[in-house]
Amino acid sequence: MSLLPHGGKLVDRFVKGDRRQEVLEKVCALPRLKIDAYAAFDLDGIAKGIFSPLEGFMGEEETRRVLDDMHLKPGIPWTIPILLSAPREMADRFETGGMVALEDDEGEIAGVLHLQEKFTVDKRELAQKVYGTTDENHPGVKYTYELGDVFLAGPVDVLKERTIEFQEYNLPPSRTREEFARRGWRSIVAFQTRNPIHRAHEYLTKCALEICDGLLIHPLMGTTKRDDIPGDVRMRCYQVLLENYYPKEHVMLSLMPVNMRYAGPKEAIMHAIIRKNYGCTHFIVGRDHAGVGNYYGSYEAQEIFSRFDSAEIGITPLFFDNAFYSKRTGSMATKKTCPGTEAERISLSGTRVREMLKAGEMPPPEFTRPEVAKILIEWARKGAE
């Protein structure tokens, strides 16, 4: 398996050296666009090569190809447009061919857009083709409807790295690739998560690790829904789990500073491509990957991979059934590996787990490790106060 980035080259749009000073001197005289945290994370993702081969925000032709054909160009799959929007009255002030300073949600100039194009896309069409629904109760659809009416496209020069809590774990693709090489890992499987890892997740990752040299636990740490468990709580869970239950020489924890879009199947493809850029060769796709509510079928995120040539994707997806603890076998399993009835399986719903945590009840050890449960109970109690 080749470790080449998507499109063949790892993008780096950070401005360095003498050129950085030149850009900084121009910034004060440029028209300015204030962007939210979501757009700031996307800008950071472009700069670091997380979204390779993108070098900026996408134009109309690229956006149309992605929406209609799920490709940036022949041979380069891509399923979700990376867009920058502005209110129409503001977009009218920006000249095509000029530069626009991008002020992030922290009040700093994060980068400069070389504006090549201004265009519009019907937001309902955008929502339907990315999320498979136009229902504004879907968090991704809701955000789409709140975007400005005009999209701005062009390459970016980035002046500021987006820093996050636990920044020491925020390794860009260039660094994870270096670390994999230093450790001598030739095959690396990535695990995407936006939740604490419970026993079923642990089982999947260890099954995958049996056929790979290394495992990258790669939690998403961009913007998420308000009711998702906070990143600092999740990080403590990952740390205690890796400290006690994984072999250190074969597992690595790093963060992925990318927004959660809740786009189900199409986001599963994007998550695979992103991990390819980080240098991974394999990617775990479980039940309802990147799903939310009841918008997607349980295994749609696995089925969508059949619509692409494996050489195009360039990373091997590993598909797993829903895992549970089997009372009959006394071990973690799936329907593929274990007989028995539903009554013989321990697999709690997220709602039931949250109820137990808020009540200070310890979920059973067959569902989650006690060290993780303790952290979650403390968090749940604080939230209930």
Image (cartoon, helix red, strand yellow):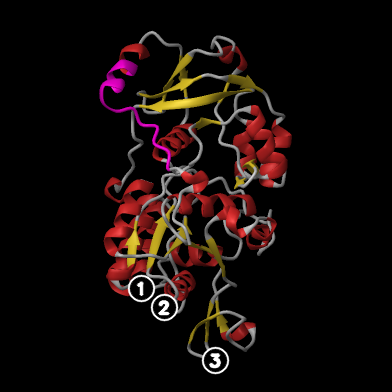
The tally of labels here is 3
Q: Which residue is mark 1?
A: 370
The residue range painted magenta reads 10-23
Give above or below for 27 relative to 358.
Answer: above
SS under mark 2: loop
Give amino acid for label 3.
Arg
Q: Residue at x 47, y 36 (%)?
A: 42
SS under mark 1: helix
| Residue in the foreground of this view, choosing between 4 and 112 | 4
Give the foreground label among 2 and 3: 3
Give above or below for 79 relative to 39.
Answer: below
Q: Residue at x 45, y 49 (%)?
A: 277
Residue 259 inside the magenta-drawn segment: no
Residue 22 inside the magenta-drawn segment: yes
Is residue 135 at least partly visible in the picture? no
Residue 119 picture location, percent across and down: 65, 22
Give amino acid for label 1.
Pro
Which class describes the residues within 10 Å of circle 1: few (<14), some (14-19), or many (20+)? Answer: some
Contact between marks 1 and 2 (CB within 8 A): the answer is yes
Sequence-wise, which precedes: disc 3 or disc 1? Answer: 3
Query: Left or right: where does residue 97 sit relative to residue 172?
Result: right
Residue extending furthest toward the bottom: 328
Measure the C-alpha gap from mark 2 to mark 3.
Answer: 16 Å
